[in-house]
Amino acid sequence: VRNLYLVRHGETYYNVEGRIGGDSDLTLRGQAQAKELAAYFAGTEVPYIFTSTRKRSAQTAAPMREARPEATVMALPEFDEIDAGECESLRYDDIRRRFPDAFAARQRDKFHYVYPGGEGYVTLRERVERGVRRALFLAGGAPGVMIIGHQAINRMILSHFLYRRTEDVPYIFIPQTQFYHIVATQRKKLFELVRFM
Ligand code: F6P
């Protein structure tokens, strides 16, 4: 694989409401972002597109899939967003009120914090790395691979390719209208944040 395009799903209803996790649909704006993404990549070779098993990731891939019926599009559960356990579907404000200790603990050490009944960045690493290995194996020598992931997932994927101090990983910028283009050669890895709309 020469080019890895790391994309975050488009805007969802949960994003607008400030809720975390869940499995909500793209908003109209999110659908427009997905269309712009496909238009941006119209002339680019991307024979493999990996998504998570969540609706927002599949819906972001839909226009890409339509534009290139020959591409392999595959959902990997390894790329599902961090499981916030008992905090799934809550707003950060709700978490602060209902679970003040958990909220404070996460702010103190976001990387090592594990949600009650869920995951943390620290436990995510293993499954995300498994997903990256699986995706790259399936894609073989393909010139371009796209992963349409989530905020925490994409942070972990970026940190897999690029050196980042662990404590910085949960704060890496993962926008919805820009993607990370990672070029990995044997000698070095380059990355660029590219705006597509
Ligand atoms: O808010 C969107 C989201 O993808 C949530 O589903 C997830 O819990 C969160 O981002 C991860 O970001 P952070 O670790 O900064 O809370």
Image: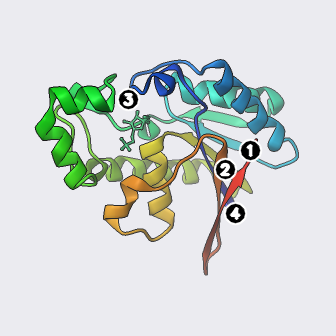
Colour mapping: rainbow
Q: Would you name the residue on which mark 3 appears?
A: 20
Q: Would you name the residue on which mark 2 appears?
A: 145
Separation of residues labelled 4 and 2 (CA atoms)? 8 Å
- Label 3 with label 1: CB-CB less than 8 Å: no
Q: Taking 7 as reference, is 84 left or right?
A: left
Q: Crowdedness of circle 3 by 10 Å Cα count: few (<14), some, many (20+)?
A: some
Amino acid identity at mark 4: Arg
Disc 1 Cβ-to-ligand 1 distance below 8 Å: no
Numbered tag placed on residue 14 in the rendering: none
- Quarter of the view holding residue 96: top left
Q: Crowdedness of circle 2 by 10 Å Cα count: few (<14), some, many (20+)?
A: many
Q: Taking 24 as reference, is 1 left or right?
A: right
Provide the secondary structure element on which disc 4 rests: loop
**Eyeballing the image, is 7 above or below 17?**
below
Closest to the observer: 88 or 119?
88
Closest to the observer: 10 or 126?
10
Who's the residue at 34% across and 53% down the image? Answer: 125
Amino acid identity at mark 1: Pro
Separation of residues labelled 3 and 2 (CA atoms)? 27 Å
- Label 1 with label 2: CB-CB less than 8 Å: yes
Which circle's residue, 1 or 4, is located before the other in the chain? 4
- Label 3 with label 2: CB-CB less than 8 Å: no
Separation of residues labelled 3 and 1 (CA atoms)? 31 Å
Separation of residues labelled 4 and 3 (CA atoms)? 33 Å
Q: Position of residue 70 (x, y in %)?
A: 79, 34
Which circle's residue, 1 or 2, is located before the other in the chain? 1
- Quarter of the view holding residue 12: top right
Q: Would you name the residue on which mark 1 appears?
A: 47
Who's the residue at 66% across and 31% down the image? Answer: 61
